[in-house]
Image: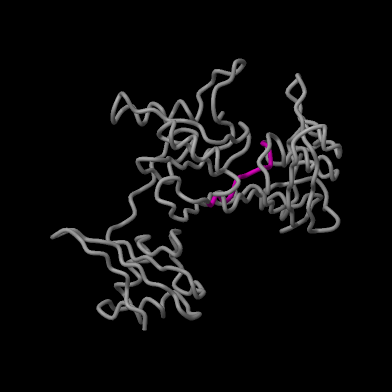
Amino acid sequence: MDKPDQPRRARGQRTDTKLPVSEPSELMAFLIAHLPHKNRSNIKSLLSNKQVLIDGKVFTQFNHPLRPGQIVTVAANRVPEMAQYRGLTILYEDPAIIVIHKHAGLLSMATNKERDRTAYGILSEYVKKINPQNKIFIIHRLDRETSGVMMFARSEHVQRLMQESWNATTRQRTYVALVEGVPEPPKGTITSYLHESKALIVYSSQNPDNGQLSITNYSVLKSGNGFSLLELELETGRKNQIRVHMQDIEHPIAGDVKYGSKTNPIGRLGLHAEVLAFEHPITGESMRFDAPVPKIFLTAVKEKIDE
């Protein structure tokens, strides 16, 4: 049996326990085997209190399967409740970064034409309450009507590190989209060159001299009622990339009038940034954050929508 990785600690300070997984197992059985001082009730409490993480992500299901190479962390203390603000939820923060779940309808950052309340503005107010000198810096953006995981830097240095190494250090960017129709084939890759017009509309071309290379991988998760739920993995991160690529294959995102949609079954753009995984710009630690797919996306492919 592997011994827990327990770092030295200051007197009286509780520390997390890291347990490497060496063979396939279920979470409860693994914890019982590696935490002999705790009984089943103790372990259930750890799970319900969100003190058990697998590769940095909280899991509460006792029968969750484990794979060799994963790290199970038993947190010394309960995970603090996530800070909620109108339009966003703070998922994580440290001295270098802030990760949020941005809700649909909130601008990422103000533009010359739009000065409404923004994620940037909310977070700027938040950090200045702690210290008026604090600032935040945008790393990437989500469209106003796109919900999901988004990250900010807490210094220009971190912003520069993240932006300069974005493709190398970003491990996963997964989106879920509600699109019109059912794509054929159900799994594929869309590659084109994107450029933006003066009217702020992004166009797609097969001419390498006519824009930036953009690659989107898609697969159909569910379909019904004339809509499909797609999982999309980005190999590049261009402005409006997913929206334009869905238009390219003639299955525009529901609610996306700008790029060819003729329906709006959920009353918003059907696009959600579900997963963002990356290397921490300072520590190099693997980080992963998830924002659950809005239930209304699932409803659209299961039940008849009255329009």
**Image check: 155 left or right of 68?**
left
Q: Residue 204's x, y, as percent?
A: 82, 35
Residue segment shown in magenta: 268-277
Residue shown at 51% from the left, 27% from the top: 118
- The figure's colour scheme reads one colour
Secondary structure mostly taken by the magenta-highlighted segment of the chain? strand
Figure quadrant of the N terminus: bottom left
Which quadrant is home to the C terminus? top right
Q: Position of residue 252 (x, y in %)?
A: 79, 41
| Residue lying at 62% horizontally and 51% vertically, measured from the top left | 174
Q: Toward which corner of the image does residue 145 lie, by quadrant?
A: top right
Closer to us: 261 or 244:
244
Q: Position of residue 48 (x, y in %)?
A: 37, 63
**Residue 244, quarter of picture:** top right
Residue ID at (75%, 57%): 220
Count of marks overlaid on the render? 0
Q: Residue 275 magenta-drawn?
A: yes
In-front residue for pair 292/97? 97
> Can you name the residue that lies furthest to the left here?
11
**Residue at the spot 67% in from the left edge and 52% down from the top edge:** 233
